[in-house]
Image (cartoon, rainbow, N blue to C red):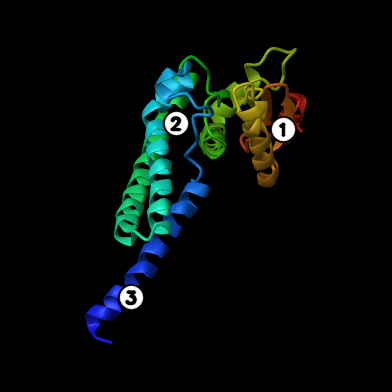
Amino acid sequence: MVASDTAAAGQPQRAEAQVATAGAAAADPGPAVGSAGSDDEPEMQQGPYFLHRRNALLLTRRWQRTTRSAAAAYSAGQHAAARQLAAQAQGLRRQALAAHAEAAERIETDNNRHNSLFELDLHGLHAQEATAALDRRLALLHGLLAEPATAAAAAAGAPASRPRAGLQLRVVVGRGAHSSAGEARVPRVVENHLKAAGHRYQARVGAIDVQLRAPAALSAQGWARRGGP
């Protein structure tokens, strides 16, 4: 077999591999990619989620449609077209991931524009975006509370009726009213994430109160007097 024949023989396998890669990505889009949740175009949806994610959702749909077209072309024996479409699908997936990441930043900023550092609203974030935002906030708070002056002010500034105010983070996770089939996936994922990391927390309807770890700046006696564990 000459070199040209060998190359031609390998084209279907390469096309199949590219289509399979694009199809696997569409089936498991990754942490940052969601769907519009209905047959309506994203621009027809209402609310902050669709306002910020409109471009990301459009890119996601284009990527998924292109992946299906690549699979159809391969099934029809159009291997060159399948390779081209699969490459386009992979490029659209990268764009969709980047657009969702940018949207998540805007959503988190808008949600918490008027909140204190001790309240984090995760509405509109996908599950892994939510856990990443939570980790960032906990790291920030634990860093601040590691400073003696900040730790003492957080504990001493609370009214007597709320001795732990300032020493816990309230995480607003919602009830899943806008999730697929009303399933509140973010609360479940966030709670499992906290449990796996060894955090103490109390789950409420629509929110989770996370106990911040005792700052070393507070003495054991002072911490106990203020209601710490």
The residue nearer to you, when weighing 184 against 152, is 184
Above/below status of 82 relative to 114: below
Relative height, residue 158 to residue 185 (above, below): above
Kindly identify the amino acid type of the residue bearing the numbered disc 1.
Tyr
Disc 1/disc 3 C-alpha distance (Å): 60 Å
Secondary structure of residue under mark 1: strand
Numbered circles on residues, count: 3
Mark linked to residue 18:
none
Q: Earlier in the sequence, mark 1 or mark 2?
A: 2
* Image coords of residue 13 (percent x, y): 39, 69
Helix, strand or loop for disc 2: helix
In the image, which is nearer the foreground, mark 1 or mark 2? Answer: 2
Q: Please, what is the three-letter code of the amino acid marked with disc 3?
A: Ala
Left or right, 129 with respect to 210, comes to left
Residue count near mark 3 (Cα–Cα under 10 Å), binned few <14, some 14–19, many ≥20: few
**Relative to residue 190, is residue 76 depicted above or below?**
below
Q: Which residue is mark 1?
A: 201
Query: Residue 51: horizontal and vertical position, in percent?
Result: 41, 20
> Which residue shows up at 34% across the image and 44% down it?
92
Q: Which residue is mark 3?
A: 9
- Residue drawn 73% across and 23% down? 204
Q: Rate crowding at label 2 as few (under 14), some (14 to 19) or many (20 or more) other CA atoms within 10 Å.
A: many
Element on which disc 3 rests: helix
Q: Is residue 3 above or below residue 143?
A: below
In the displayed structure image, the side of residue 44 where residue 177 appears, left or right: right
